[in-house]
Image: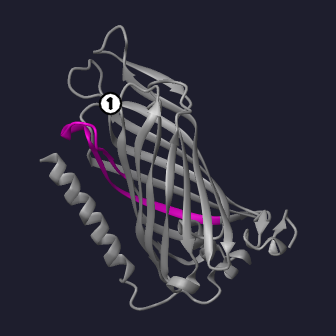
């Protein structure tokens, strides 16, 4: 029953995303959206930072504070779990029509509750580094797919960098990733899918998991935006009662300028009506800061004469 409900919730989220993509009449992205962002327009910067296949370089620091339920049989109630993620976004043009977007996710720390080794009914806690995600997306430019459509596809990896068995799986993992979205003057909506399957490593069990991130944001004036927040998670190897996490959430963001540096601040909250029975996420309070970086590699990689490196124009 929970499996069917989780899949229904995922389908509902995707249907909502598709509806929002066309909710803003037939408006299109104005010519020069990325140029406006480069000139410092706060709303356009927010729009480009929300776009998973934009040309902006940025670094996101994301702090998650999860409330987790240990499940039946434990002598303690809900506990906190937190992590701080370091997420650079580094797009580089391969040709005038194709971009390669690299998006690593590096857990700077993970504080994870888990069963105590000497007493499985008691909850212990471990704080350590987590596994690293390395994503590459090949994305066509607007010249190929139109001004509004956002497309990307490529491999995604998980490296076993965790320093504890409780903060990682101990497995090398790889799988497909894809982004499909629609960007209008005031809306962005779409879905970002990653799925990993283990192929080696010292972890105790094989893994096969999914992270589906629907995104839908409405952009306001002066750099403000409001939208959906949450990642649908699936562990295809787990039992039905521990397989799915389906969140309902909202995020509010604002782009401000600290001196010459534009920074996007975002506050988000998620409630998980569907979550694993054992140590499942019940809700999350999330804060992120995303400064825009100077583009250090300009030009096309397949045209060496066009390449420019460094901070100069």
Quarter occupied by residue 307? bottom right
Secondary structure mostly seen in the magenta stretch:
strand
Q: Secondary structure at mark 1?
A: loop
Residue 272 percent location from the top left of the image: 30, 48
Whether 54 is drawn above or below 132: the answer is below
Residue 94 percent location from the top left of the image: 67, 70
Question: Could you tell me which quadrant the C terminus lies in?
Answer: bottom right
Whether 126 is drawn above or below 22: the answer is above
Q: How is the image coloured?
A: one colour
Whether 231 is drawn above or below 18: the answer is above
Badge 1 is on which residue?
Answer: 78
Residue 255 percent location from the top left of the image: 62, 66
Q: Is residue 168 visible?
A: no
Residue in front for this viewpoint, 51 or 301 = 301
Residue 151 percent location from the top left of the image: 48, 72
Residue at 62% x, 79% y is 97
Q: Is residue 197 visible?
A: yes
Q: Is residue 248 magenta?
A: yes
Q: Residue furthest right?
A: 312
Whether 272 is drawn above or below 160: the answer is below
Residue in front for this viewpoint, 130 or 77 = 130
Q: Which residues are magenta?
A: 232-255
Q: Residue furthest left?
A: 1
Residue at 36% x, 49% y is 210
Does residue 208 appear to the left or right of 313 in the view shown?
left
Residue in front for this viewpoint, 99 or 59 = 99
Residue at 44% x, 29% y is 112
Q: Residues within 10 Å of mark 1 (few under 14, many from 20)?
A: some
Q: How many marks?
A: 1
Q: Is residue 83 magenta?
A: no
Residue at 54% x, 57% y is 266
């Amino acid at each position: 029953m929970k499996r069917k409900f989780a899949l229904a919730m995922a389908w509902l989220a995707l249907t909502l995303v598709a509806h929002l993509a066309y909710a803003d009449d037939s408006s299109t992205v104005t010519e020069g959206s990325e140029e406006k962002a480069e000139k410092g327009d706060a709303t356009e910067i927010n729009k480009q930072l929300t776009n998973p296949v934009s040309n902006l370089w940025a670094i996101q620091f994301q702090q998650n504070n999860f409330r987790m339920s240990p499940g039946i049989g434990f002598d303690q109630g809900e506990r906190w779990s937190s992590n701080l993620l370091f997420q650079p976004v580094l797009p580089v043009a391969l040709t005038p029509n194709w971009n390669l977007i690299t998006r690593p996710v590096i857990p700077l720390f993970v504080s994870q509750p888990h069963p105590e080794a000497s007493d499985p009914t008691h909850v212990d806690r471990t704080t350590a580094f987590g596994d690293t995600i390395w994503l590459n997306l090949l994305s066509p430019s607007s010249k190929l797919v139109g001004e509004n459509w956002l497309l990307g596809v490529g491999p995604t990896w998980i490296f076993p960098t965790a320093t504890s068995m409780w903060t990682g799986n101990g497995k090398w993992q790889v799988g497909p990733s894809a982004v499909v979205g629609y960007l209008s003057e005031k809306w962005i909506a779409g879905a970002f899918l990653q799925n990993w399957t283990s192929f080696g490593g010292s972890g105790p069990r094989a893994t096969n998991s999914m992270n589906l991130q629907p995104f839908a944001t409405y952009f306001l004036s002066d750099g403000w935006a409001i939208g959906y927040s949450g990642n649908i998670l699936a562990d295809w190897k787990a039992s039905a009662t521990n397989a799915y996490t389906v969140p309902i959430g909202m995020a509010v963001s604002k782009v401000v300028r600290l001196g010459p540096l534009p920074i996007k601040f975002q506050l988000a909250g998620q409630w998980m009506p569907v979550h694993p029975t054992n140590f499942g996420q019940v809700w999350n309070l999330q804060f992120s800061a995303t400064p825009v970086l100077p583009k250090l590699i300009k030009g096309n990689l397949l045209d060496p004469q066009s390449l420019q490196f460094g901070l100069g124009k």
